[in-house]
Image (spheres, grey):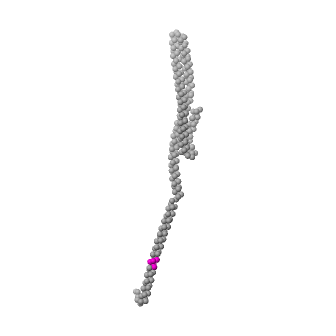
């Protein structure tokens, strides 16, 4: 019963669908770490149970070998007693011959009992050997699944870190878009343009003031010419 229970557990763990579990996990890395720990512990427990089962099998095999050896030993004693009986009977000592024949019978009975004892171990050994082979296969499957799980965990951790890095970059870009620094530059540019326009206005204003002065000077020159000509008329002279 214990072996069957262990086999059931091994089979369940080996058939575990990692991808399906990961799809339901809120934190796959933590779940995978826990699964690795669970698998590792389950393998340790299974190894202990398998080792115990193998130990029991080896004890049965030792008992079977001992029974076989005992049967062989009694068989040898029976043969030796029978030969002795034949020798004594050939020498005409029937009483001693009968005694050795009786010893041979006792030895043969012991041989039969030992053979029966040995035979009784055979189905148990066969059954336990089958269980041990299944357990070994289950353990091997668990070890492969554990390696697959570790590989899956490492891959997922790497992917998770890459996704986190990409998310940070995305958030940074999004923040830049929200802040829109170009708008600040645009405002500064507009301020510079207004300052440039003010300077141009001042230059135009200065230029217009200078033009007015030259025009006034020219007007004064015209007036002077008029006065000279008037004076000439009054003096009776010509300006030609």
Side of 203 relative to 46 (left or right) = left
Q: In the figure, residue 220 lies in which quadrant? A: bottom left
Prevailing secondary structure of the magenta residues: helix
Query: Quick check: 174 above or below 139?
Result: below
Can residue 179 be seen here? The reply is yes
Q: Is residue 7 above or below residue 231?
A: above
Residue at (53, 35) in percent of width and height: 47
**Residue 145 visible here:** no
Q: Position of residue 100 (x, y in %)?
A: 53, 14
Q: Can you name the residue that lies furthest to the top here? A: 92
Q: Number of callouts in the render?
A: 0
**To which quarter of the image does residue 117 belong?**
top right
- On the image, the x and y values in percent for residue 36 come to 53, 41
Instruction: Identify whether 93 is placed above or below 179.
Output: above
Residue found at the far right of this picture: 1
Residue 158, above or below 209? above
Q: Residue at x 51, y 40 (%)?
A: 147
The image shows residue 2 at horizontal and vertical percentages of 58, 33
**Pick the front one: 155 or 27:** 27
Quarter containing the N terminus: top right
Q: Position of residue 177 (x, y in %)?
A: 52, 57
Which residue occupies the foreground of this view, 86 or 29?
29
Q: Residue at x 46, y 75 (%)?
A: 209
Q: Residue furthest bottom?
A: 236
Q: Is residue 104 magenta?
A: no
- Image quarter (top left, top right, bottom left or bottom right) of the C terminus: bottom left
Q: What segment carries the magenta color?
A: 212-216
């Amino acid at each position: 019963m214990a072996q069957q229970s262990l086999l059931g557990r091994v089979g369940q763990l080996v058939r575990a669908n990692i991808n399906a579990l990961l799809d339901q996990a809120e934190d796959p890395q933590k779940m995978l770490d826990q699964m690795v720990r669970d698998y590792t512990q389950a393998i340790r427990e299974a190894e202990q149970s398998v080792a115990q089962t193998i130990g029991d099998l080896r004890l049965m095999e030792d008992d079977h070998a001992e029974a076989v050896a005992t049967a062989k030993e009694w068989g040898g004693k029976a043969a030796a007693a029978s030969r002795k009986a034949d020798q004594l009977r050939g020498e005409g000592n029937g009483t001693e011959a009968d005694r050795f024949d009786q010893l041979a019978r006792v030895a043969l009975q012991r041989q039969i009992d030992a053979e029966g004892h040995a035979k009784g171990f055979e189905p148990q050994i066969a059954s336990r050997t089958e269980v041990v082979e299944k357990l070994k296969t289950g353990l091997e499957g668990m070890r492969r699944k554990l390696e697959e799980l570790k590989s899956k965990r490492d891959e997922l951790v790497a992917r998770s870190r890459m996704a986190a890095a990409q998310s940070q970059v995305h958030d940074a870009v999004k923040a830049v878009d929200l802040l829109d620094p170009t708008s600040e530059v645009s405002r500064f540019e507009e301020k510079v343009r207004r300052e440039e326009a003010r300077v141009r206005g001042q230059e135009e204003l200065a230029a217009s003031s200078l033009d007015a002065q030259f025009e006034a000077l020219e007007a004064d020159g015209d007036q002077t010419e008029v006065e000279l000509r008037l004076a000439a008329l009054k003096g009776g002279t010509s300006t030609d």
